[in-house]
Image (cartoon, grey):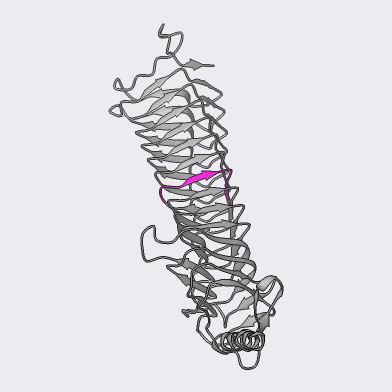
Amino acid sequence: MRTLSKIQTTLVAMIIMVILPFTGYAGEGKIQIGQTAATTFPITISQSGSYILTSNLTVATDVDCIVIAADNVTLDLNGFALVGPGSGTGTGYGIRALDRNNITVQNGTVRDFGGLGISIDTTLHGGVKNNRLNDLKAFSNGYAGIQGDGATITNCSASMNSTGISGSQGTIINCTANYNSSYGFNIYYSTLTNCTAIGNSDGMSGNENSLINCTASENSDDGFYGFYLSITNCTAKDNDADGFNILHSTTTNCTAYSNGTNGFKVEHSTLTNCTASYNSIFGFEVSSSIVTNCTAYGNDDTGIFPTESRIEGNNVRNNGAYGINAYNASSNNYIIKNSASGNPTNNFRNGGTNNYMPICGVSTSDNCNYSF
C-alpha cells in the first residue's frame, strides 16, 4: 500500500506539471512559474492555490501573459516583471481574471502590454469580492495599468498608461497614479485613502466615492472630478483647470491652491472648513450649495462667487477683485456672518435685492457680514 501511495502521488504531480507550464514547486506549497524555451502564452491558472514567479515573463506577441481561471488563487510575482511586446494599440493583458473571487496578486511589475496591465474584472454587478492587489507597479500599458473590481488595492503605482488605476466597489490605499495620458484614478463606488495623482489629464475622477487624505497635483485638467463624493482632508494644487469640480458632494477640511481656473467649482454640494488660495479665477464658484467656515485668499479674481447658495461664517481676504461677489440680482443667495478684508474692488458685492447679504454698520442684523 505504501508503494501504491507513492506512485499515485508522483502521477498526480506529473499530471499537474504537464497540464500547466510551471517549473515545479516552491517552499510552503507554492507552485513555481518560470519562463523556459517551451513556454507558450497565455499561461492559464485553472486550479486554486498559491503560485510564485521564478523569472521574468516576456511576451513577444499581442496575447495575454497570465490568465487566472479559478477562484482562491494567490499569485506572487516575487519581484519579477511581466513584460509585453509594447503598449501600442494591442489587446493583450499582463494578468487577467474575470468574475473570480479571492484573488491575490502581489509584489512585482507589469509593463508594456497593449491592453490592461492587471485586470481583476467582473461582468456581474457585485459579483467579484475579496480580491487583493498589493505592492505592484504597472507602467506603459495601452489602457489601464491596474483595474480592480471588488478589490483592495494597496501600495500600488501606475504610471504612463492611458488610465492609471480604475475599478469599482473597492478599497484603494497608499497608491499613486502619475503621468498617465487620461485619468490618474477612474474609480466608482469605492474608498480611496492616502492616494496621489500627479501629471495626468484628470487626477481623480469617478462617482459615489469616499476620498480621504488624497492629493491631486499638476494634472492638465481637474484635480478631483465627480458626483456624489465624500471628500475629506484632500488637496488639489497646480492643476491646469479646477482643483475640485464636483456635484452633489460633501467636502470637508480640503485645500485648493494655485489651480488654473477655480479652487472649488461645486454644485448642489456642501463645503466645510475648506481653503482656496492663489487660484487663477475664483477661490469658490458655487451653485445651489452651502459653504461654511471656509477661507479664500489671494485668488486672482474673487474669493467666493455664489449662485443660489448659503454662504456662512467664511473669511475672504486679499483676493484680486471681490471678496464675495453675489453679482446676480435673481440668484437668491443667503450670505451671513462672513468677514472680508483687503479685496480691492469690493469686499461684498450685492447684485440685487434677491440676495440676503446684510453688512455690519449698515444693518443691525445679528447675521451681518463684517467688512474691514
Asked if one can make out residue 142 in the rendered structure from this viewpoint, the answer is: no
Task: Tell me how many marks there are.
Answer: 0
**Residue 159 located left or right of residue 189:** right
Question: What is the residue that sits farthest to the bottom in this orientation?
Answer: 38
**Residue 177 located left or right of residue 288:** right
**Residue 244 located left or right of residue 247:** right
Name which quarter of the figure residue 356 lies in: top left
**Residue 213 located left or right of residue 322:** right
Location of the N terminus by quadrant is: bottom right
Above or below for 271 versus 247: above
Above or below for 11 versus 286: below
Question: What is the residue that sits farthest to the right in this orientation?
Answer: 27
Q: Between 191 and 371, which is closer to the camera in this rendering?
A: 191
Name which quarter of the figure residue 249 lies in: top left
Question: What is the residue that sits farthest to the top in this orientation?
Answer: 364
Name the residue located 69 percent from the left edge and 70 percent from the top edge. 28
Magenta span has 7? no
Location of the C terminus by quadrant is: top right
Name the residue located 52 percent from the left edge and 56 percent from the top edge. 220
Q: What is the x, y in percent for residue 3?
A: 66, 88
Q: Between 1 and 41, which is closer to the camera in this rendering?
A: 1
Q: What is the x, y in percent for residue 176?
A: 60, 56
Asked if one can make out residue 138 in the rendered structure from this viewpoint, the answer is: yes
Q: Between 88 and 148, which is closer to the camera in this rendering?
A: 148
Question: What is the residue that sits farthest to the front in this orientation?
Answer: 1
Q: What is the x, y in percent for residue 329?
A: 30, 26
Q: Which residues are magenta?
A: 207-216
Name which quarter of the figure residue 275 lies in: top right
Q: Between 341 and 61, which is closer to the camera in this rendering?
A: 61
Q: What is the x, y in percent for residue 299?
A: 54, 36
